[in-house]
Amino acid sequence: MTHAERNESDEVVGSAVVADDVPTGNTYDKYNTSNPIERRMMKGFFEHLDAFVDVTEPKRILEVGLGEGIVSERLRARFPDASIVGIDLADGELGAHWRSRGLAAAFADVEHLPFADDVFDLVVAIEVFEHFPDPGRALRELARVGSSHLVASVPFEPVWRIGNMVRGRYLSALGNTPGHVNHWTRGGFSRFVGGQWDVEDVASPLPWTMVRASTRR
């Protein structure tokens, strides 16, 4: 990242601390899996993600749950002139991974975002709402800092849990993935997002639900 790019990112995040050594995320890299079935599913997922973000013309993007940085890298390739900031909970293990990709990162709690109102014209929340202790509060915070569009996805839990059980995983929890404390169907997640945003489109790249919404003014 150049000095100018870092200054631009600092301006976007305001009081947040931008740092390369505080990322967190899923250490299983599902985006680069070698499993042919999972690769086909991820291909469909990314096709829908690209279609949803391409209707926007963002200048400032926030990704919630930066993780491995794969989604932010994809956004950077599609919107090279946009300023992109990712947030996640503190976890030093992915620090070198983020530094090698030159991604701007901020340690932040999604339920108490250190950003001003209406800062980001695209907010992306991929595979994170199922983990939030208070998803409603998180959604309100994203609505506060967002000025235009939200693209969010969650596992379609009925299919997700069946798939886990077929593979013999998490049987004692009836297939529930550890850390998934919130569960939605397609309609349920659309209604949830619609509580704070105006839902424009809903897609079901198996086994996920993806929503594109716009801010409500």
Image (spheres, rainbow, N blue to C red):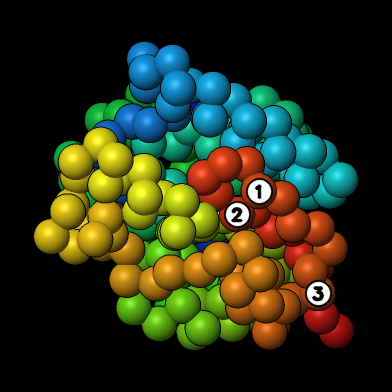
- Up-down relation of residue 55 to residue 36 (above or below): below
**Do the residues under discs 1 and 2 have CB atoms within 8 angstroms?**
yes
- Up-down relation of residue 76 to residue 217 (above or below): above
The quadrant of the rendering that contains the C terminus is: bottom right
Disc 2 residue type (three-letter): Thr
Residue 3 visible here: no
Residue that label 1 marks: 204
Using the image, tell me which numbered label, if any, was put on residue 106: none
Disc 3 residue type (three-letter): Asp
Residue that label 2 marks: 209
Label 1 vs label 3, nearer the camera: 1
Task: Measure the C-alpha gap from mark 1 to mark 2.
Answer: 5 Å
Numbered disc 2: secondary structure: strand
- Residue 134: x and y, percent? 40, 82
Label 2 or label 3, whichever comes before in sequence order: 3
Task: Measure the C-alpha gap from mark 1 to mark 3.
Answer: 18 Å
Q: Residues within 10 Å of mark 2 (few under 14, many from 20)?
A: many
Disc 1 residue type (three-letter): Ser
Numbered disc 1: secondary structure: loop
Residue name at image x 60 percent, y 36 percent = 45
The residue nearer to you, when weighing 126 against 78, is 126
The residue nearer to you, when weighing 191 against 29, is 191
Residue that label 3 marks: 198
- Up-down relation of residue 46 to residue 39 (above or below): below
Label 1 or label 2, whichever comes before in sequence order: 1
Residue name at image x 33 percent, y 30 percent = 29
